[in-house]
Amino acid sequence: MPNQYLSRRVAGLKPSGIRKFFDIAATMKDVISLGIGEPDFTTPEPILQAGIRSLQRGETHYTSNYGIIELRRALAFHLEKHYGVRYNPDNEIIITVGGSEALNLAAIALLNPGDEVLIPSPCFVSYQAGVILAGGVAVEAPCRMENNFDIDPDQLRAAITPRTKAILIGFPNNPTGAVASRENLLEVAKMAEEHDLIVISDEIYDRLVYGVKHVCFPAIPGAHDRTLLLGGFSKDYAMTGWRIGYAAGPEHLIKGLLRVHQYMVMSAPTMSQAAALEALLKGEPHVQQMVAEYDRRRNLIVSGLNQIGLPTFEPRGAFYAFPKVDVTGLDDETFCNRLLEEEHVAIVPGNSFGLGGEGFARCSYATGYDQLEEALERIERFVGKI
């Protein structure tokens, strides 16, 4: 058996539904891909140049395991300025290889075998996998379209057991674009305190919000000391390939992450840290320009999908629309497969993102406006044929 040498955890992992559709689309011509959650913008020029200057200065060596202190100080200032949440840059912030490493560090550092992590879903595909690979058990609490895919506190409460160790939330949400309400986040904080749980809050899309304010979870009264805040530069600053993220939290938790980080990767890429510092210092105008353009695309795709007859709630964050496709009589997997085969438009079945995603599909609007218009025409043609 080919898998006899693999651990049960790895052998049992479900392949990423996102990557599957991307790989298929890559073999076809004339495909419009709304499948990958990656900004189509190039990293803004000042940030690019900062990375280049770092290389030219010969900064090609390891940094502190925590990351360069100038970046940690700038990040601490940034978080306090925008959200009023304070971290000591000396020992409460660690710079990671993207938000993905921050997530894996948190899971490995926190979980003992069999510990349960509650995850509102639909959610980013790595959440369940990260918990499982760390030896934990992922327990999903579905969110629903009728509640704008906001957290359902009752679902979370019902899922708590003596083995529950943490709650993992990701808002603004991938894949739905939902933004969690302050009211429901307060309920999460209350639950965490009552049951002595850690909250891991992935806020990678924090700056990409439309007409609402992002609520930073550790800024909620009483939440700071039991929260690990995860974030990064990939989405807000169009820096996916730079692989630069962070985790922030109480010193005793960050020290746990550091122990794993120093054995896993040593330190985040040095030139990427220099670029991230520039992003914090001078990237704000570029963030605002990108948000304005995403908002324009958001309005186009949401109204377009609804007009086609695919019910789509209004996403208030990130860059995804999450239409209900099973109204066509096709399940989400069949709908997406046939749309790709017949009209060469790649979107991702909602079931790739866990419970609550069945019957929906994720459409990324992090692609050009003209491409979105053409994709909507093709989707309309496809739906008309069903």
Image (cartoon, helix red, strand yellow):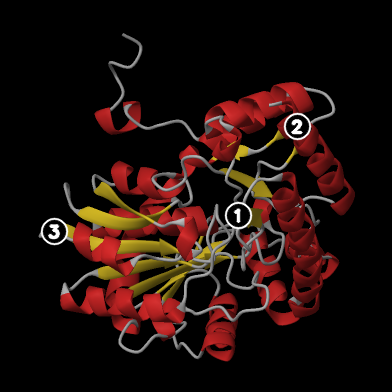
For label 3, the residue is 161
Q: Where is residue 227 drawn, in percent x and y? A: 34, 74
Q: Nearer the viewer, mark 3 or mark 2?
A: 2
236 or 325: nearer the viewer: 325
- The kind of residue on which mark 3 rests is Thr
Q: Residue at x 46, y 54 (%)?
A: 101
Q: Secondary structure at mark 3?
A: loop
In the image: residue 177, left or right of residue 30: left
46 or 137: nearer the viewer: 137
Residue 153 figure quarter: bottom left
Q: Which mark is residue 384?
A: 2
Q: Residue at x 40, y 31 (%)?
A: 14
Which residue is most to the left? 162
Q: Are the residues tagged 3 and 2 within 8 Å (C-beta)?
A: no
- The kind of residue on which mark 2 rests is Gly
Q: Which mark is residue 243?
A: 1
Q: Distance between the Cα atoms at labels 3 and 1? A: 36 Å
Can residue 286 be seen from the camera position used here?
Answer: yes
Q: Residues within 10 Å of mark 2 (few under 14, many from 20)?
A: few
In the image: residue 187, left or right of residue 285: left
Q: Where is residue 229 drawn, in percent x and y? A: 43, 71
Q: Are the residues tagged 2 and 1 within 8 Å (C-beta)?
A: no
Q: Quadrant of the N terminus?
A: top left
